[in-house]
Amino acid sequence: MSEMSRRKFAMVTAAGVCACCASAEAGQERGTESEVPATQPESPTIDVGTVTDFAHEGIFDRFQQPRKVLVYRQGERLYASTAQCSHKRCTLMVIDATALKCPCHGSAFDINGVPVNGPATVALFRIGISISNGRVVVDPRQQFAEADWEQPGAFIDLPKPASP
């Protein structure tokens, strides 16, 4: 077997790259599926259910992994926060109905998202929450620091339950 010069190696490599690109382009034009499935971009808002889905107090983590969002019911208020620690952005774990913990560095947060154990020193950001067509909708593009938690859009006031 003869040795290949650098020039010939570069030409063969370039030809191979061009052939791969042309093949991929031709496959897309014919409408064939690529190895990576096409996905729709995620909606910026998240439909988290109806008010009745949050009938009891506590932290609801159904959207913790896929969208990094937690929903809370505390008294007659419903609010949402990021599910990422304010220290290094690790995904938080729900310990019980009133507490969160960061698995990376041990920070702990109460049901309000306020750190009770460091190294985190900043409360979790609340994110926009509203009711639209009877559905609870969370909008992570709207963020509220602790000083803004009483602002409109940072929570939903729920109707008081009917007395028997």
Image (cartoon, helix red, strand yellow):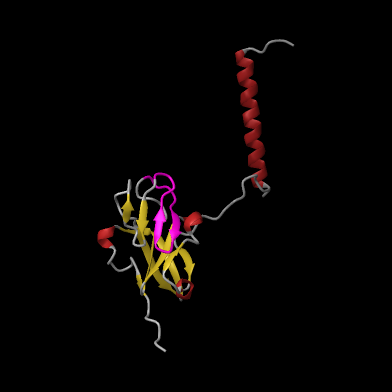
Magenta-tinted stretch: 88-105
**Residue 123: quarter of image:** bottom left
Instruction: Give the residue at the far bottom of this rendering.
Output: 164
**Residue 1: quarter of image:** top right
98 falls in the magenta region: yes
Residue at 60% over, 14% down: 6
x, y (%) of residue 148?
27, 62
Instruction: Give the residue at the far right of this rendering.
Output: 1
x, y (%) of residue 14?
61, 25
Return the residue nearer the eye: 22 or 3: 3
Residue at 35% over, 46% down: 87
Q: Is residue 85 above or below residue 62?
A: above
x, y (%) of residue 35?
65, 44
Return the residue nearer the eye: 50 or 164: 164
Instruction: Give the residue at the far left of this rendering.
Output: 147
Viewport quadrant of the C terminus:
bottom left
96 falls in the magenta region: yes
Residue 82 visible somewhere in the drawing: no
Q: Is residue 124 left or right of residue 22?
A: left
x, y (%) of residue 137?
43, 67
Residue 98 visible somewhere in the drawing: yes
Q: Main secondary structure of the magenta part?
A: loop
Return the residue nearer the eye: 24 or 135: 135
**Residue 88: quarter of image:** top left
Residue at 67% over, 43% down: 27
Q: Is residue 100 above or below residue 30?
A: below
Residue at 48% over, 66% down: 47
Q: How many marks are shown on the rendered structure?
A: 0
Q: Is residue 134 above or below residue 84?
A: below
